[in-house]
Structure formats: structure tokens, C-alpha cells
Amino acid sequence: MPELDGKVAVVTGASTGIGRAVARELLRRGAAVVIAARSRERVEEAAAALGCTGVVADVTRAEDVARLIDGTIETHGGIDVLVANAGVYVGGDLWESDPEALDRLLTTNVNGVVRTVRAVLPHLLERGEGDILVTSSVSGHQAIHWEPVYSASKHALQAFVHTMRRQLIGTGVRIGAIAPGIVLNDLWGVSDPSEIDDKVARGEGIRSEDVADAAAYMLTRPRHVTIRDLVILPREQPI
């Protein structure tokens, strides 16, 4: 299986959860990894624990994204992999939701991904090779009624990935989306290790590390192979 020695990867939303697990897995496979997140305290703690570079960056801010991408290229000589993972969650009935929270969700989950991908593409196109992996959700593959705006944001990401894949034909740059179901991490309010173990044993949830393993699989396929979509669910998720 191809590994990632000598590759440089940027992972957004990587201070906790899926992003942190993906960063750890890419490091294990030999990549140099730059992680980014909005919280200085969290990103510095994660970078120290992982042994990689951490950058404070809000993907909804153009200047932050430019500093992240340009700084990585300057420091490491290039970027081979972008994992656009930063995202937030709001569920529940629409009429009871905070409009400001919904705006933040759409700005982060959709605009933030588009902005980050747009920033890295000129560099990847110039190199004629690279990988972009977007963290989507099973909510992007079917409309889930208890999270209407979150589901809408992930449907938008699916459309973005599918159209970008076709725009990038002939460039050497691959793009794909990984779409998890229930992941037992902070985003879903689950942090107790015993609770995670119990739910995993019952097939009611998956770990961030399961998603990271699948993400690494996508990124390490031979260059003639693109995995456009990978949906990863716990065995017992009834959707």
C-alpha cells in the first residue's frame, strides 16, 4: 500500500475529533502535517500532543486561510494533501434554532470548505498532482429531518465535490468526500471513554480513528484511482 513519506498535509478542524485523528494517522504514515483550528489553546495542545505544526485559523476568514496555505508552502516547500474537515453542527427543529448559529454553520461547513479548497488549488494545479479530501456526512447522501440545515450543508458539499472532480479531470489533482454516520466524539457530545467503548461494542457508533483509517485509505490509493465518495457507518445505524 502506498504510504505518505515526504508528503505534506494540511488538516483543518484538527484540534479534536475526526480532524485530530486524521492528522495522527497521516503522521503515522510518514506525512508532515500542519493542523489548523480556531481555538489557539486547543490547536497548540493538539500540535504538542501530535508532534506537528499547529496554526490558528478560522476557515471563514480569507486572511486566515491565506496565511495557513501560504505559510505551509513557504515552510514545507509545498502541499500534497488538503483535508478540509472544519465544520460545526446544529440539529433540532428549525423554528427553535438560533439563526446566528445556523449562519455560522453554513459559513463554516460550506463557505469555509470552498474557500480553503480555492486557496490550495492554484498550487496543486501548478504541481500537477495532489489530493483534496472533504469531510462530508451521511447527511449529505440523504435528507435527515432532525438536522435540516446541517443536512443541507452536507448536500452542498457533495455537489461541490462531484462538480470539482469533473473540473479537475486531466490536472492530476484528485478530490473526494468521506461521509461518516454517528461518530463518537466531542462534536456529538460524547467524550467519556467507557460510553464510547460501550456504543462501539453495540455497533451504535464509530470512533474518529475509524474515519481516519478510511480517510488514509482514500488518500493512499494508486494515482490512477479516485474514490469519489466513501460512506462509513456504524453497523446498527438505522438510516
Image: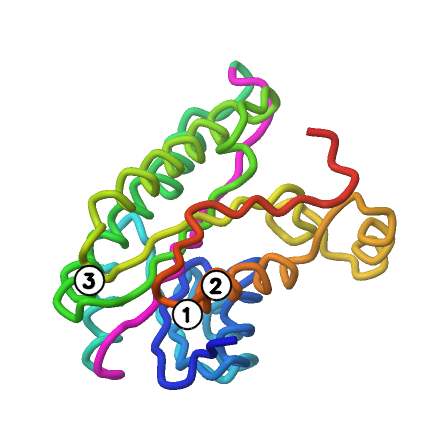
Callout 3: few (<14), some (14-19), or many (20+) C-alpha neighbours within 10 Å? Answer: some
The spot of residue 90 in percent (x, y) is 53, 33
Q: Which label number is shown at residue 177?
A: none
Residue span colored magenta: 75-94
Q: Quadrant of the C terminus?
A: top right
Q: Is residue 89 magenta?
A: yes
Residue 8 against residue 97 in the figure, above or below = below
The spot of residue 217 in percent (x, y) is 53, 64
Magenta stretch: helix, strand or loop mostly: loop
Which residue carries the number 1 mark? Answer: 35
Amino acid on which disc 1 is placed:
Ile
Callout 1: few (<14), some (14-19), or many (20+) C-alpha neighbours within 10 Å? Answer: many
Q: Which label number is shown at residue 14?
A: 2
Q: Earlier in the sequence, mark 2 or mark 1?
A: 2
Amino acid on which disc 2 is placed:
Ala
Which residue is painted at 86% across and 53% down in the image? 201
Mark 2–mark 1 contact, CB under 8 Å? yes
Amino acid on which disc 3 is placed:
Ala
Residue 53 against residue 159 in the figure, above or below = below
Local SS, label 2? loop
The spot of residue 130 in percent (x, y) is 28, 66
Residue 8 against residue 238 in the figure, above or below = below
Q: Is residue 45 magenta?
A: no
The spot of residue 231 in percent (x, y) is 57, 44
Q: CA distance from mark 2 to mark 3?
A: 17 Å
Which residue is painted at 57% across and 29% down in the image? 91
Q: Earlier in the sequence, mark 3 or mark 1?
A: 1
In front here: 126 or 21? 126
Q: Which label number is shown at residue 66?
A: 3
